[in-house]
Amino acid sequence: MRGHGHYIKDRRLVCRLGYQRELIESIKRELKMSWADLAERMGVSEHTLRVDWRRERSTLPLGYAKKIAKILSLNLDDVMSNVVKILPSNWGQKLHHNGKKIRAPSLDDPEIAEFIGALLGDGHLTKYTVELCGDSRLDKHYLVNYIPKLVSNLFLLDGAIRVQQNTLRVKFQSREMSKWIVENFNFSYGKKVDLLNRIPKIFFKNVFQLAACIRGCVDTDGGIYRFYDRLAVAFFNKNKMLLKDVADGFKQLGFHPSFTKGEEVWILRRNDVLSYLSLVGTSNMKNAIRVNEWRNKGRFPSFSEVFELINKGINVELPYILDGPVV
C-alpha cells in the first residue's frame, strides 16, 4: 500500500466540482466498508482516499478512476464526461533551489488556485520570500497547519512561523517559488495593499479552480459571519479590481453578491450561503467552527469560544464542505 505523501505516477483527472467526492462516497456506500478497509482494498492510504480524494484536495489518478468505475458498474465514458481536463503523469515539473528539488505545480491544480487566493487575500511577495499573515489566535490553525501543508504538497517546501503580538506570519524562503508565481500569474512584488494583483483569468475558465481560489481569498481576508438571524459570507479588500474579481467569481458560481462601503462584498441570501458552503467551503478552522456551532447549536460562537475550540484541536476535516442543511 502506498503511504500518504507518496506520488502516484499516472495521468490525473480534473473533474467537475463535486464529482470526485461523489465517486469516492459512492464506492464507500456500495461496498459498505470503513475508510481504512476501503483504502486497503484500493491500495492507497486512508488519508489519500478519505481526505485528499474525497475532499478534492488532489486530483484522481486515471487508473483508480477506472477501478472505481468497474466496482460501481459505471461506463467509463460516463465518468470521463465529468472530467474537465486530463493532466499528464509528469505534470509536477521540477525546479532547483539551493540543491533541493522543489516542485512547480500544474497550473490546472486546484490546490495552487487555493494558495493563490490566499496570497491575494493576505499575502506578501518579495523576490526571495512568499509570506502570509493573520490573527495569531483565530488564524493559528490555518497558518501553522493548513497553509504549510498546502505549500509542501505543491512546492515541497517548508515554512517558518513567526508571532509578533497578535499577528502570526508563515514565510516561505524561495526565490524560485516567488519567481514562478510572478511569471505564471502576472503578480507584482510587494504588500497586498500596494498591489493591483487580480484573480488569474485561467481560474475563471474552470469552476473547480475558481471555487478553490475564492475559498483562499475569503479564508484570509474575509470569513463567515452572523447577519441578523443567519450566516453570511464576506470578503474585504482595498484592491478595487480584486474586489470586483471576487464578486464576479461569486456570480459565476451562481451566487448574488452585494457590495457595502466600497471595500466589502457579501453573500447574504440564505440559499446562496448554503450553496457557498456546499460548493466552495472553507479551509480556515475558525470559519468551520462558526458554521459547525451554528449548524449544531443554532448559535454563533464568540471570539473567545472559537479561540478555545481551536486550541482544543476540534476534529474537523479541511476543506470543510457542508454536506447537510444549515439551521
Image (spheres, helix red, strand yellow):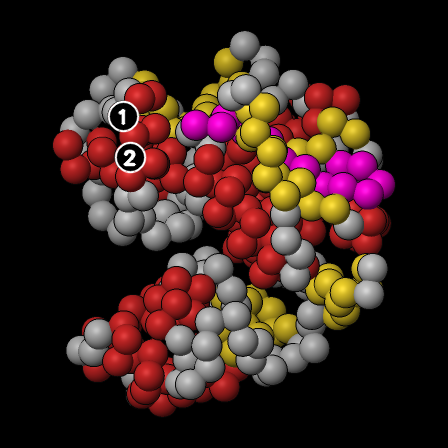
Question: Does residue 284 appear to the left or right of 311 in the view shown?
Answer: right
58 left or right of 269 in image: right
Between 311 and 248, the one nearer to me in the picture: 311
Asked if residue 128 is among those painted magenta in the image, a careful observer would answer yes
The location of residue 46, given as percent across then percent down, is: 35, 72
- Which SS type dominates the magenta stretch? strand
Task: Give the mark count.
Answer: 2
Q: Is residue 102 above or below residue 125?
A: below
Which residue has dot 1 on it?
305
Of residues 56 and 201, which is closer to you in this image?
56
**As shown in the figure, which amino acid type bears the numbered disc 1?**
Glu
Residue 318, percent from left and from top: 40, 50
Q: What is the span of residues highlighted in magenta in the rendered image?
A: 125-137
Residue 65 in sight in this render = no
* Dot 1: element: helix
Q: Is residue 163 above or below residue 32?
A: above
Q: Considering only vertical position in the picture, is 87 above or below 157?
A: below
Residue beneath the point at 59% across and 16% down: 263
Residue of label 2:
309
- Residue at x 77% of width, y 50% of height: 174
Three-letter amino acid code at the position of disc 2? Leu
